[in-house]
Amino acid sequence: MDLRDCRPTDRARLHRIDGDRQQRRRLMELGFVPGQILRVMSRGATGGLLLAVGDARIAVDAETCRALRVSRLGHAA
């Protein structure tokens, strides 16, 4: 599944990043590495998400959400 399927308060484990080499490298520089736990903080009006990635908060657009392949872990405590 991709990150668009997650709802606010969901946690998900990142499995892989689809997309071109440049996009994958940039996302990895921001902390999006396989195995990383992502927490969905909120959803934007156009489909983007605000994510907690470690201690950082990162906003990603809908296209980037499609590239992030994850498995849902459930709601954050």
Image: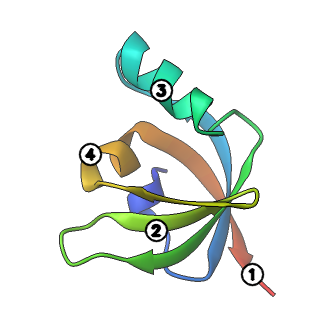
Separation of residues labelled 2 and 3 (CA atoms): 17 Å
Hey, which quadrant is residue 19 in on the image? top left
Residue designated by label 2: 50
> Relative to residue 2, is residue 16 drawn left or right?
right
Residue designated by label 4: 63
> Relative to residue 58, is residue 71 drawn left or right?
right
Residue 22 pos. (x, y %): 39, 15
Mark 2 surroundings within 10 Å by alpha-carbon count, few (fewer than 14), some (14 through 19), many (20 or more) = some
- Given the image, on which type of amino acid does mark 4 rest? Glu
Hey, which quadrant is residue 23 in on the image? top left
Residue farthest to the left? 46
From this view, report whether residue 41 is shown above or below residue 6. below
Q: Residue at x 77, y 40 (%)?
A: 35
The disc, 4 or 2, on the residue closer to the chain's N-terminal end is 2
Residue farthest to the top? 21
Residue designated by label 3: 26
Element marked by disc 2: strand
Separation of residues labelled 4 and 2 (CA atoms): 14 Å
Residue designated by label 1: 76
Residue 69 pos. (x, y %): 52, 42
The disc, 2 or 3, on the residue closer to the chain's N-terminal end is 3
Separation of residues labelled 4 and 3 (CA atoms): 14 Å
Tally of marks: 4
Separation of residues labelled 1 and 2 (CA atoms): 14 Å
Element marked by disc 4: helix
